[in-house]
Amino acid sequence: MTRLVIHAGPRNTSWSDVQRQLVAWRQPLHQAGVVLHPDDRPESWLTDAAELARGVQTTALVTTVDAAVSAGASIVLLSAESVGDALRDPDQVANLVAFAKQFAMPLTVVAVVRDQLGRLNEVYCERVALLQMARTFPSFAADPSPPQRYDYSTAFDAVITDPEVDLVAVPYSDLDAGTEAKPVLRAGGVDPASISELPDTPPLLRPPGPVQVAAARLMFKRLWRLGIIKRAPRSSILEAAAALEEHSVTAGWDRAPYWGWDPASRAEAIGRYRPGNDKLARSVWGREWGDDWPDFDFVETDLASLDPRLVVDVLTTIDQLVKDVDIPSETAAES
Amino acid sequence: MVESIIIHAGAPKTATTYIQRALHANRAALAERGVYLPQAGRLELEPNAVCHHHLAWSLISPQNYPDARNPWTALREELATVDAPVVLLSSEVFSRVASKDERATLVEDAVRGLCDSVRIVYFVRNQLSLLNSLYGQRIKSFRLLYTFERHTAIYRERRLFDYEALLKPWYANDALNFTALPFSGERDVDPLQQLLTFAGIESFPHALADEDDDVNSSLGPVGIEAARLLGCYLRGLFEDFDPEEMAAKRLYRISSARAQRNGWCDESFWGWTPRAAEEIVQHFAESNDRFAHDVWGTDWTIPMPVDRKPSAVHLLDLPPPELEKVQRFVFSMGRRFSELRGGDAA
């Protein structure tokens, strides 16, 4: 019998690496009886899974699942970090169950559970690096949006209480760089012998470092002040963000990733999130959450304390990138 | 004939510039009252102020003042022709003479033979305000890039801030008379009048020096961060940047004026958190009391503004318009420095 395994993310649990590895391993996984979404592009995986949760079955998915069931595949594996949000909604969970039933497949949901400290730090870096905001980390972490995404006390209740779904929660700390997808495959019931033969793939994403984060905040404020954020199309802003990131990597601005939690804010956040995490951990692992909270050195980014040559590079790079942002001529003329 | 010499020796950041400019502004009236302000040893760059920095510098670095250029020799010759009851010398650089043990007697040696009565007057300011104010000055003049916390962690151990260690070689020296005047920093207490009263001139209706000064104004919190970033930028752009070079000194004046126009001197900077301030107060409590007992016969009574609200800001947290202003300031001052250097080279 073919089983439907949905890797539901959630967001900021290395989904991009997982997706990339699954695509890279498509052939050996197929030989092991694991069928993936037919398209390699991550956006197709995300869109079709989100649609499925909303009750819309795309042709690509239906065709793929139908063929897999007919061929006697052991697993159809769908993976989309956005489904993590859908798991809070009993109606969307019901849609997933209905789809599995339609093809007589039992349903397993695999969710990677990550502490909120690491998640919030990553989300913050992501939003700042993409020039979406320039808030301070303490202000962002104290009031993350949307807040329910970080409250684990009820995060998987709709799945846990549904007798037709088998939930397997994987601690984020089980994911190692280069092999992030392997624990997901193990949790989904893929043959361990097949998994062990899959090659490692080097990590693609490099988390931003403190200098890049500082530069992005500075650049965002500059773009905002000059009105470019409003006038330029989002694609131009994203190009500028990508150029900033590329330059920061090429020029070697950072040696370590950004970490915004200082000891006091870390302790406060742990106190805030621990009860919900304990409740979840008892539900899915039969134990307390424990001490699975990351701890790194907090370094406040103070531009004037950096190497002066680096500061010149940061300031002149931002200045040039801001000038290079492509603003449609009509909009530019209006301003 | 000179009856007494008064040396106004500082401390830095106790309205010394104001006093020195006011002395110059009132030189005629002071002369009528028997106060002579020597020309020897004056700083040429401050023609409108009475500051005898060369007298102090020649004690610290005598190699820079060979015989013919020794300002003390010039002073001796100048005073030989003077008939005034009081001679007043002023330079906060004298505090640097006192800042090292082996230098403490240099002042005594220098004034020996000039006059039988020599008195050193020193304005004493609470260490919290002094450290805070010196930090701003060092940042503004590009000498320093540190954060306030790092600056105070390093400089608090300097002798300049421990009045007992700094001034005991003077007040315990029988050959010198020493007077410590409390510096409140309050507007209603005029340090010039304090100094003149001490010199025996009461209720002197002096003409005040122009206080509308865009160079000497203290930087506020945004100005501090802008000047730090500029100092860093200059070092990154010009590997051999030296805050003591002439172009840097000129830029200091230009950037100070720009900071003033940008409104960065309107608000005052206060880098201390109450907790850090309390710790400093405890650090100096015993030596301050001993110093006060030695010079005033009382416990230390100069108020310590422990509870003053911190006003430091983080550059990246500034609102976009202010941050934009800072970046424009840095770029334009960088270009200006390049021009100034070019001018100097030419």
Image (cartoon, coloured by chain):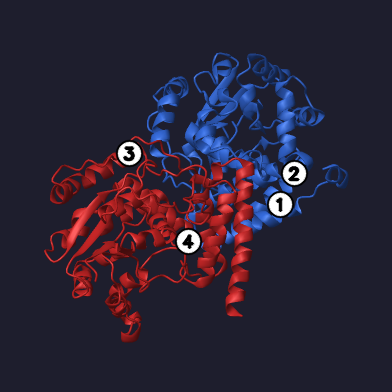
At 19% from the left and 58% from the top, the residue drawn is B178
Q: Colour of chain A?
A: blue
Q: Secondary structure at mark 3?
A: loop
Q: Residue furthest left?
A: B174
Q: Secondary structure at mark 4?
A: loop
Q: Is residue A176 left or right of residue B294?
A: right
To which residue does mark 4 refer?
B142
Dot label at residue B305: 3
Quarter of the figure that contains the C terminus of chain A = top right
Which of the two labelled residues, at mark 1 and mark 2, occupies the earlier sequence position? 2
Dot 2 amino acid type: Ile
A37 relative to A286, above or below: below
Q: Is residue A77 left or right of residue A293?
A: right
To which residue does mark 1 refer?
A322
Q: Which residue is at the front of the view, B236 or B99?
A: B99
Q: Which residue is at the front of the view, B37 or B49?
A: B37
